């Protein structure tokens, strides 16, 4: 049991406790506006169960804090005009920074999850130059120039940083990042003082799950599994609106779940036909090359994502042609294999939804094959298919998802996070 996490009941006064309760109610109001806005005060009262006078008081505090804004009154056919409220889309922003293999992408994200501006900087090509210090310095320089140009008079509430690999965000640590060659890198320490604080670190797939939780496919459910199948593979398990991490923040490793019995597929690490060896973007591209469906990568190309798009384009019917059958068969088989591994997760966790993300969404016409395979394998049967949905935010999600852990704090603790309590 983590004693330090418990509220020190004896150490706060009755007045403070009332303030925290008021903050909890203000957060409920903010969440109702995010989920259903623009909404009137009467509708907020209905959604939150708070009394009309409480909603009136809380909304004026939130308007004063610059978190909510009023729209022009709507004249109803009878009764008093209603003033719809929405989250102020410009005033409060977070900086999102995603550190990838080839580039660092960053931008400003509004409290309603919209990306207001973004920019990217390419990393050095030589592997030896991809040190945490170099990447951090480069990001800091780029961000400084970007904020000078784009922040204006907005209120910046902090910086969220996301990165792939095995990440222990609570300790600010990148435990291991294979492609960058990083091991036990104290990334937050490296970035402290270089980027606007407070700083929050999150693993990429979990950050995507948190973006979907607040602004996307997870808005109406309290639990879901986000499954990322792309250049990398990973899952984030959301229970009671919280991402599960477990000891060492090691949860969500799905690479070696069984995906095929095909004896020709053998993972060099686990020795079986796992998801990584048979259904990741890299495995798919390698198979397409071996089958002669893709040209060798042109010089200067930036990686497998373009190859994936080429393969999907070849499979698609165009003009009078019906599309390349070999490419279609590969994409269908990849979807089926992914479905088999997902069926294992579904039976184990029984999530309200499976939210798919990553390169698998580029070939969206094969998602029904994936759903059919899950339905075939899962003990839940056909009913499960409709709970498998694509992530709302597509490829342009990295900046948004990086910023969400910072925005999440404003949504859940609006007064504390802004220094008003
Ligand atoms: Zn494996």
Image (tube, rainbow, N blue to C red):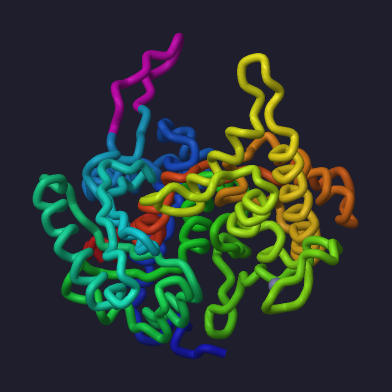
Quadrant housing residue 242: bottom right
- Residue 76 is covered by the magenta coloring: yes
Please give the count of numbered marks on the rendered protein. Answer: 0
Per the rendered image, the range of residues in magenta is 70-83
Looking at the image, residue 62 lies above or below residue 344: above
Position of the N terminus, as image quadrant, is: bottom right
- Residue 383 is covered by the magenta coloring: no
Q: Give percent across and percent down for residue 376.
A: 89, 49
**Furthest-top residue in this view:** 77
Q: Is residue 61 visible?
A: no
Quadrant housing residue 386: top right
Of 26 and 402, which appears nearest the observer?
402
Residue at 61% over, 63% down: 235
Of 327 and 214, which appears nearest the observer?
327
Position of the C terminus, as image quadrant, is: bottom left
Q: Is residue 151 visible?
A: yes
Q: Is residue 182 left or right of residue 372?
A: left
Q: Give percent across and percent down for residue 400.
A: 38, 50
Q: Main secondary structure of the magenta part?
A: loop
Quadrant housing residue 261: bottom right
Q: Give percent across and percent down for residue 7.
A: 44, 80
Of 327 and 380, which appears nearest the observer?
327
Residue at 46% over, 82% down: 175
Residue at 35% over, 80% down: 12
Q: Give percent across and percent down for residue 231.
A: 54, 58
Q: Is residue 230 left or right of residue 333?
A: left
Where ligand 1 lies, by quadrant?
bottom right
Q: Is residue 383 left or right of residue 245?
A: right
Of 327 and 61, which appears nearest the observer?
327
Residue at 68% over, 20% down: 321
């Amino acid at each position: 049991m983590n004693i330090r996490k418990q509220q020190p009941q004896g150490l706060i006064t009755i007045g403070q406790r009332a303030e925290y309760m008021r903050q909890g109610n203000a957060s409920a109001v903010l969440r109702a506006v995010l989920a259903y806005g623009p909404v009137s005060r009467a509708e907020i009262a209905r959604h939150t169960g708070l009394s009309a006078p409480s909603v009136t008081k809380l909304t004026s505090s939130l308007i004063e804090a610059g978190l909510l804004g009023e729209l022009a009154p709507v004249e109803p056919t009878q009764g008093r005009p209603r003033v719809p409220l929405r989250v102020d889309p410009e005033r409060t922003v977070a900086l999102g920074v995603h550190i990838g293999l080839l580039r660092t992408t960053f931008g400003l994200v509004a409290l309603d999850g919209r990306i207001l501006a973004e920019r990217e900087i390419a990393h050095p090509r030589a592997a030896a130059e991809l040190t945490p210090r170099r990447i951090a310095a480069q990001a800091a320089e780029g961000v400084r120039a970007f904020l000078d140009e784009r922040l204006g008079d907005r209120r910046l509430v902090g910086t969220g940083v996301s990165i792939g690999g095995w990440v222990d965000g609570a300790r600010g640590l990148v435990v291991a990042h294979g492609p960058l060659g990083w091991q036990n890198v104290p990334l937050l320490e490296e970035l402290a003082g270089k980027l606007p604080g407070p700083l929050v670190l999150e693993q990429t797939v979990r950050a995507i799950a948190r973006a979907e939780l607040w602004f996307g496919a997870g808005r109406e459910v309290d639990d879901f599994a986000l499954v990322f199948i792309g250049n990398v593979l990973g899952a984030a398990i959301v229970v009671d609106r919280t991402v599960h991490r477990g000891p060492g923040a090691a949860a969500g490793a799905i690479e070696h779940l069984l995906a095929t019995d095909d004896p020709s597929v053998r993972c060099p690490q686990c020795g079986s036909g796992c998801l990584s060896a048979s259904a990741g973007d890299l495995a798919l591209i390698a198979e397409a090359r071996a089958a002669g469906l893709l040209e060798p990568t042109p010089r200067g190309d930036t990686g497998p994502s373009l190859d994936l798009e080429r393969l999907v384009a070849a499979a698609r019917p165009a003009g009078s042609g019906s599309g390349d059958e070999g490419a279609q068969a590969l994409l269908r088989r990849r979807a089926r294999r992914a479905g088999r591994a997902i069926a294992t997760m579904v039976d184990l966790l029984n999530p309200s939804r499976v939210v798919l993300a990553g390169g698998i969404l580029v070939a969206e016409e094969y998602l029904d094959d994936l759903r059919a395979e899950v339905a075939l394998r899962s003990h839940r049967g056909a009913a499960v298919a409709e709970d498998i949905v694509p992530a709302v935010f597509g490829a342009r999600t990295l900046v948004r998802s990086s910023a969400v852990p910072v925005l999440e704090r404003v949504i859940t603790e609006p007064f504390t996070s802004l220094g008003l309590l």
